[in-house]
Structures are given as C-alpha cells and as structure tokens.
Image (spheres, rainbow, N blue to C red):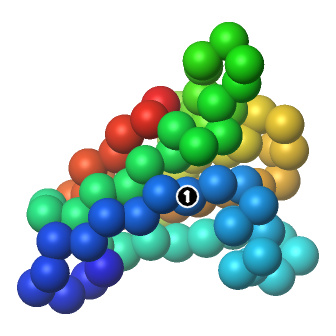
Amino acid sequence: MDNSNNDAIILTAALVVSMTDNDNDLVIRGNSGDTIDLSEDSDTDGNSDWSATANSSMSGFTEYIHSANGTISVFIDDDITHSGL
C-alpha cells in the first residue's frame, strides 16, 4: 500500500489473526489514494465490529480494536481512507 498505486483492502478480524503473531497487532502504511474497508465484520444489526480508540499508541495512525476480541488491533496510517465503520 505504501507505493504509488491506489490500493484497496477489505480487512476482517480473521485475516488480521492469520497475518499476525500472538499479539494480533497489524500496522498498515499507505498514502492518500489507498482505502481500507472494515465493514466485512458487521454484526447482523449492520454495525461495525471495529471501533477507533481515543488515543492511538502510534503517532500518525488510527488504532481500531475489534469488539468481539479486544486483543485484535489494526493501526491504519492516517493518510489512508477508512470505511465500513
């Protein structure tokens, strides 16, 4: 994502777990043309299972925690468009 292309990713909690170690922390760097869609983990009520934390531990990134498993965190570069929340 951190290249000259405009990349798009649909991300689920299961994907984060499969790509990370036991800490379940994923950092995504990118640029303004990139997009991350977290809507695939919506409940039956249509609400997202991801929520932004008030204070990210990484400057320049927004941290999202998964509601069903609070140990799953995604840190998304603030330059990337976030959707599905």
Question: Residue drawn 89% across and 76% down?
Answer: 22
> Compared with residue 67, is residue 1 higher up or lower down, i.e. above or below?
below
* Residue type (three-letter) at the residue carrying disc 1: Leu
Horizontal relation, residue 33 to residue 85: left or right: left
Left or right of 67? Residue 9 is left
Q: Quadrant of residue 60?
A: bottom left
Q: Is residue 76 visible?
A: no
Q: Secondary structure at mark 1?
A: loop
Q: Please give the count of numbered marks on the rendered protein.
A: 1
View extreme (top): residue: 45
Measured from the top left, where is residue 73 in percent x and y?
67, 56
**Position in image of residue 2 (x %, y %):** 26, 83
Residue 49 visible, this angle: yes
Q: Quadrant of residue 51?
A: top right
The residue located at (51%, 45%) in the rendering is 38
Q: Nearer the viewer, residue 8 or 30?
A: 8
Q: Position of residue 52 (x, y in %)?
A: 53, 36
Is 9 left, or right, of 40 in this rendering? left
